[in-house]
């Protein structure tokens, strides 16, 4: 042990050499596909594995993660640097499999499988990707580095644990989207609560952070217990919880309805839908900026992904039977959240309730059971990940400067932060589905799918979406517009001296700060470019998911 402590620098240098050597080998494999196939045949003879790329990539990622663990707490810059390096390697790893599944639409590409035979249960650790899961995996790989970059300066204590928890969260999320076995999905689904609990409760910004962390943990865990009961029932009666196996099982109508309700309650808490949405605003307000971006951009998609992946394909009769119930809950969820958003004074709560609006809105498309509705819902999930993440980054930038998230102290910010106000305007327009953004494509397809199913419901949803646009315009106007000339303030003194004093203090307070820096500019550009690119060229996303949904509709519904 003493030898390891004295030679820590030596071991770190060894890990550096191994890491960079493996990285060079990684790029060589990625660029030379023929070399990959040749060495893959060689290793398949010795290692009994045809996937040499998977073996070396996992070794590289493990070495990188172990290196971060061994770095001292005081070397904050090295921790941050290698955490970003780890995320980039993980993204490159899945980009290789993205090429392999470029024309794989209706079946999984299994890249790892392990079965544990116990006395009672038979859990299959099967990991695979297809055209649906790869979209959510890349959304995860895209947003987690932004969570780390935007927390570069704001997290100044226990930085190592903060960054390690985000890396663990990223690995667990990828396990969720790669899971082929429902029990593995449930385990990864619930394991995400552990790092998020600490990210909210320990690095939160206010005194109520522990209350928000407990509320988040108990709501999501309690809702998922019914799903666990349904999985145990499937395991005891059918002997497996594998997705492909259960797809061929025909449930009796009453059993299917009960299992459907158990699954739906677990997914509804994650989305969240009324009346189990209370945990989301509290968790957003108390969480750090990086936690809010991960929560809104990725974790809310776990519920809708579960519905797309498991609920609708496995339980088609229950999905059609309970469609009126889903529409009723979604309708009141959108209406209630729209009116509640207008009454909020905390910037994070406003964006949190807007997330409730959008997630409930896309539920209409999921249960329209047509190609347009399903495609629009999936596009809205991706769009919401970028746009809501960008809005939370904007709120985090304001909080880092002014240390308040209340709406009242702000006003006329476009005069002091013009570049920042431009980015906030773009995200606001995308949030209300302005033409040219990916949100517009998603909402248009969802509306088209609803109209194809029922014209009356389509008219109600279309007019209801007007309420959801009011808060966005009101928010931007309150923060970035306002009085700027001192003579105008003087004219107000005769009417309301208190108003004059507060406004004057507000402007002088904001003049002490500058516009966004390079790191913040990169973060905002990183999130805004996909929104505009996919909005102007949506075929890159639509072509990938169209055949998948066509296959699902023809084979299941």
Image (cartoon, rainbow, N blue to C red):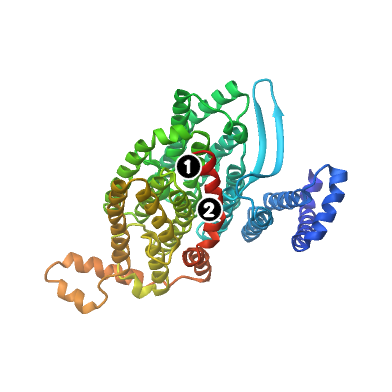
Left or right placement of residue 525 versus residue 364 in this view: right
- Please state which of residues 427 and 241 is positioned toward the viewer in this rendering: 241
Residue displayed at 68% across by 49% down: 69
Kind of element beneath mark 1: helix
Is 448 above or below relative to 325? below
Residue hosting label 2: 546
Q: How many marks?
A: 2
Q: Quadrant of the N terminus?
A: top right
Task: Give the quarter of the image for residue 417.
Answer: bottom left
Q: Position of residue 487 (x, y in %)?
A: 20, 79
Q: Residues within 10 Å of mark 2 (few under 14, many from 20)?
A: some
Q: Position of residue 414 (x, y in %)?
A: 35, 72
Residue displayed at 85% across by 48% down: 43
Q: Position of residue 212 (x, y in %)?
A: 42, 42
Do we see residue 223 in this rendering?
A: no
Is 469 above or below relative to 256? below
Task: Give the quarter of the image for residue 195.
Answer: top right
Residue hosting label 1: 303
Left or right placement of residue 490 versus residue 381 in this view: left
């Amino acid at each position: 042990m003493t030898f390891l402590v004295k030679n820590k620098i030596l071991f770190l240098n060894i890990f550096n050499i191994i890491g960079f050597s493996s990285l060079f080998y990684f790029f060589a494999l990625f660029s030379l596909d023929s070399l990959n196939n040749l060495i893959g045949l060689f290793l398949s003879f010795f290692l009994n594995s045809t996937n040499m790329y998977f073996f070396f990539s996992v070794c590289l990622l493990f070495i990188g993660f172990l290196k971060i663990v061994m770095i001292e707490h005081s070397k904050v810059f090295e921790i941050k640097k290698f955490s970003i390096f780890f995320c980039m390697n993980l993204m490159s790893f899945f980009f290789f499999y993205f090429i392999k599944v470029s024309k794989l639409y209706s079946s999984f590409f299994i890249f790892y499988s392990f079965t544990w035979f116990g006395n009672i249960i038979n859990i299959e650790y099967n990991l695979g990707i297809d055209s649906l899961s790869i979209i959510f995996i890349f959304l995860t790989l895209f947003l987690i580095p932004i969570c780390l970059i935007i927390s570069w300066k704001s997290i100044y204590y226990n930085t190592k644990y903060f960054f390690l928890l985000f890396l663990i969260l990223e690995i667990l999320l990828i396990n969720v989207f790669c899971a082929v076995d429902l029990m593995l999905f449930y385990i990864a689904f619930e394991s995400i609560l552990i790092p998020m609990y600490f990210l909210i409760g320990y690095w939160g910004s206010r005194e109520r952070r522990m209350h928000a962390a407990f509320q988040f943990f108990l709501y999501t865990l309690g809702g998922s217990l019914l799903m666990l009961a349904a999985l145990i029932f499937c395991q005891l009666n059918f002997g497996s919880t594998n997705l492909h196996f259960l797809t061929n099982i025909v449930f009796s109508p009453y059993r299917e309805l009960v299992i459907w309700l158990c699954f739906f309650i677990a997914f509804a808490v994650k989305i969240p839908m009324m009346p189990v949405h209370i945990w989301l605003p509290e968790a957003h307000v108390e969480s750090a900026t990086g936690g809010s971006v991960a929560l809104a951009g990725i974790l809310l998609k776990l519920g809708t992904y579960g519905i797309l992946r498991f609920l609708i394909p496995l339980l088609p009769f229950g999905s059609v039977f309970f469609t009126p119930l889903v529409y009723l809950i979604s309708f009141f969820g959108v209406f209630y959240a729209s009116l509640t958003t207008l009454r909020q004074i905390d910037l994070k709560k406003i964006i949190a309730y807007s997330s409730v609006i959008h997630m409930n809105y896309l539920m209409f498309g999921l249960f329209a059971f047509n190609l347009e509705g399903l495609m629009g819902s999936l596009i809205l999930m991706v769009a919401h990940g970028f746009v809501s993440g960008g809005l939370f980054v904007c709120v985090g930038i304001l909080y880092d400067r002014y240390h308040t998230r209340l709406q009242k102290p702000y006003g006329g910010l476009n005069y002091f932060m013009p570049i920042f106000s431009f980015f906030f305007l773009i995200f606001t327009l995308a949030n209300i589905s302005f033409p040219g953004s990916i949100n517009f494509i998603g909402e248009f397809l969802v509306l088209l799918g609803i109209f194809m199913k029922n014209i009356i419901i389509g008219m109600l949803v279309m007019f209801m979406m007007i309420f959801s646009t009011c808060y966005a315009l009101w928010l931007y106007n309150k923060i970035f517009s306002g009085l700027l000339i001192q003579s105008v303030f003087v004219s107000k003194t005769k009417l309301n001296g208190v108003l004059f004093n507060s406004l004057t203090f507000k402007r002088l307070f904001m003049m002490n700060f500058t516009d966004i820096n390079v790191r913040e500019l990169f973060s905002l550009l990183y999130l805004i470019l996909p929104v505009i690119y996919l909005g102007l060229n949506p075929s890159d996303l639509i072509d990938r998911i169209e055949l998948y949904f066509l296959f699902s509709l023809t084979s299941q519904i």
